[in-house]
Structure formats: structure tokens, C-alpha cells
Amino acid sequence: MPQAMRIPRRLLLAAAALPAAALAKQAPRPVERAPVPLVMLDPGHGGKDPGAIGYSGTYEKHVAFAAAEELRRQLNASGRCRVELTRERDIFIPLADRVGIAQGRGAALLVSMHADALTDTEVRGASVYTLSDTASDPQTAALARRENSADRFGGPAFQNVSPTVASILASLVRQETRVGSARMARAVVGALEPEIGLLPNPARHAGFMVLRAADIPSVLVEMGFMSNYRDEAALRRPEYRARVAAALRRAVEGFLAANRAAGVAAG
Ligand code: ZN
């Protein structure tokens, strides 16, 4: 079944070719308090899918969950958004369902959190990924294949990856989502850069299934690579995860603040 799409109100108005002046002539609306945006954190893998298995045996699913919990704690402490996790326990959730959870809950942003493995055990550092039909580089293409293969553990294959609604409206929403995802990726790189080591060209893209929500800006953060023993050792430490989470909190809040400002400008 195609994913339901949430159409931002201002796009609906644009589609109806309602001039902005007409809006201005309407009676003033009562002051509406903007709803507190929901951020969906998606700890990668879980249950029968351990994710990457680290150099010394650490499971990616545990690191991803611990980091997501820490980020939720920090975001809740500053109170500028609501936060939910796609999984609260060590359970397997198919990739399409993770997207569906974010859409069903009306998330303003999806951050999928990982610490994967590469065949090259020397590679280390954080990186952030957005959705694209073509991969930015072979390493990222391989990473996306590995991520997308999570569904081999069960669950339905991702259906209808290409939206069937070929309307201008849908494409406007997708374009806005792409722009939002790229903006969030830049915010993540900017926040992580002074804190921890990054891959060269740390903002990359490929066909990650979990980033396919047409209407929710989505990024996948690789906090490091479990295949590198130094990254694995760092990610096992709560203090290190807290530092990563603090940087991600700044990126999330910066993203949401810019959204709010753009919302005001758009009326
Ligand atoms: Zn992963």
C-alpha cells in the first residue's frame, strides 16, 4: 500500500493558486501555538538483526540503542521538541515499518542511528547519509546495500519504493523533503566536526531504504565504524556517546529552529 503523504498546508495553498494577498485579507486567526515538533530517532537494527559485529564483538544494535536513548535524554532535557524511538526494546523492525512509524506519528524529522562495518577495517570516523537514487561513492553504495539487507532477517520487502502518486504536489513535497534532509545533513556535519573524527567528504548519499519517507526529512548517521577497533572502543564508552549525542542535539535543534523561522516567513 502506498505510504500516506502529509501535505504541508502552504503547499496545498500554493497548489490551489491562492494568492498570498488573499490570505492576508482573511480575518486574523486566533494566535495558534505551534505544535512542538516530533523527532523520531531510529536506533538501527535490533532483535535477530545485530547489525555490524564489532572488532571485539560489540553489536551495533546495542550501541545504536544506547546512543539514541542518550540523545533522547538530552533533547528532552532542553525541551524544544518531543522525541520518540522507533524501537524501545531489542526487537526487529523491518525498514519499511520504521518509515511507517515516523509517518504515522507525524514526525518532523527522522534520524536513523548506526555504527556499521566496512570491509576496510582502517576506515573510521562519523558520517551522515541522505537518500539518493545513485550513490555518492562505491563505499557508500556498499554501505547502503548492507543497511538495506537488514530485511533479510524477515518482514515484508519494501513495497512501492517509487511513489505511485505522480502529481506535482507530491513532487513538491519530495523536493522540500530533499532540501530539508540535505540541510539536516549539513547541520550534523557542522555539529560533529569539532567534536569527533569524520570521514573525508562526510556528507554522502545512496539508496537507503530507511530514508525513503517522501514527506519527512531523514538522515542516517554513522557514528563511527564497528569494524575499526578504535571507533568500536570509543562507541562502547558512555562519555563518548554523550559527546556524539550532544552534537546531534545541537544539529536537531538548529534544524528545527530554522524550520520554525521558515514557517513564520511563509505565513
Ligand atoms: Zn547499521
Image (cartoon, rainbow, N blue to C red):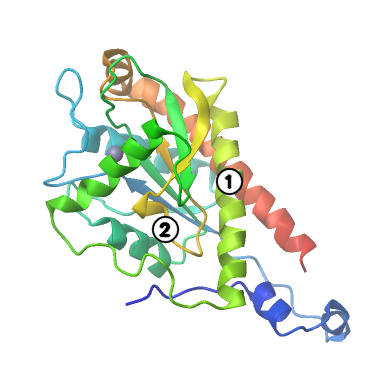
- Earlier along the polypeptide chain: callout 2 or callout 1? 1
Residue 149 seen in the figure: yes
Q: Residue at x 26, y 14 (%)?
A: 229
User: For mark 2, what is the residue?
Assistant: 212
Rendered location of residue 222, percent (x, y): 39, 33
- Which quadrant: the N terminus? bottom left
In the picture provided, is 168 more to the left or to the right than 58? right
Position of the C terminus by quadrant: bottom right
Name which residue type carries label 2.
Arg
The Cα–Cα distance between marks 2 and 1, rounded to whole angstroms, is 14 Å
Q: Quadrant of residue 126?
A: top left
At horizontal 69% and vertical 80% (from top left) the residue drawn is: 15
Judge whether 249 appears above or below 82 on screen: above
Q: Out of 214 and 193, give the one closest to the viewer.
A: 214
Up/down of 119 relative to 23, above or below: above
Location of residue 90 in the rendering, given as x and y in whole percent from the top left corner: 17, 46
Residue where numbered disc 1 is placed: 182
Residue type at numbered disc 1: Ala
